Image (spheres, rainbow, N blue to C red):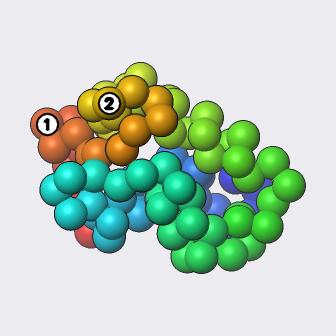
Amino acid sequence: KASSPSSLTYKEMILKSMPQLNDGKGSSRIVLKKYVKDTYPIVGSASNFDYLFNSAIKKCVENGELVQPKGPSGIIKLNKKKVKLST
C-alpha cells in the first residue's frame, strides 16, 4: 500500500487513471506513469515510486484486471471482462 495522505494503493490509482487514458487501444506504461505522477503528486515524489508502480501493474496483469497484449513493454489496457468501473 502507498503510505500517502491520499490513502489509495498504487493499484487503485492505476485502475482509476486507466479510463482517463484508455482510448480503446490502451496506454503505454510511460504515459500512465506520467499521468499518475501528475494526478497524485505526493505519491509521484516517492523515492521508490517506479518499483511500486511497476509491481502494481504486474499484479493487475496477473489478476486479469489489466491486459498487456504485446508483452511487458507494450501497451496496457483495461480488461473489460474483469473490471467493473464504479465511478
Residue 30: x percent and y percent?
A: 53, 55
Residue at 27 percent of width and 46 percent of height:
78
Instruction: Look at the image and tell me whether residue 13 can be seen.
Output: no
Residue at the top extreme, as displayed: 62
Q: Nearer the viewer, mark 2 or mark 1?
A: 2
| Crowd rating for badge 1 (residues with CA inside 10 Å; few <14, some 14–19, many 20+) | few
* Residue 66 at x, y percent in the picture: 33, 38
Residue 44 versus residue 62 in the image, above or below: below
Callout 2: SS? loop
Q: Residue furthest right?
A: 47
Q: How many marks?
A: 2
Question: From the image, which quarter does the C terminus lie in?
Answer: bottom left
Looking at the image, residue 24 sits to the left or right of residue 38; the answer is: left
Q: Residue 74: give x, y in percent of width and height.
A: 40, 38
> Which labelled disc corresponds to residue 31?
none
Q: Closer to the N terminus: mark 2 or mark 1?
A: 2
Horizontal and vertical percent for residue 84?
A: 20, 49
Looking at the rendered image, the quarter that the N terminus falls into is top right
Tag 2: amino acid:
Lys
Question: Which residue shows up at 73% across the image and 52% down it?
Answer: 49
Q: CA distance from mark 2 to mark 1?
A: 18 Å
Q: Amino acid at mark 1?
A: Lys
Q: Residues within 10 Å of mark 2 (few under 14, many from 20)?
A: few
Q: Is residue 63 visible to us here?
A: yes
Q: Residue at x 81, y 60 (%)?
A: 46
Read off the residue under disc 2: 70
Secondary structure under tag 1 reads: loop
Position of residue 38 in the picture relative to residue 45 (left or right): left
Q: Which residue is mark 1?
A: 81
Residue at figure coordinates x 48%, y 59% from the top left = 32
Mark 2–mark 1 CB contact (< 8 Å):
no
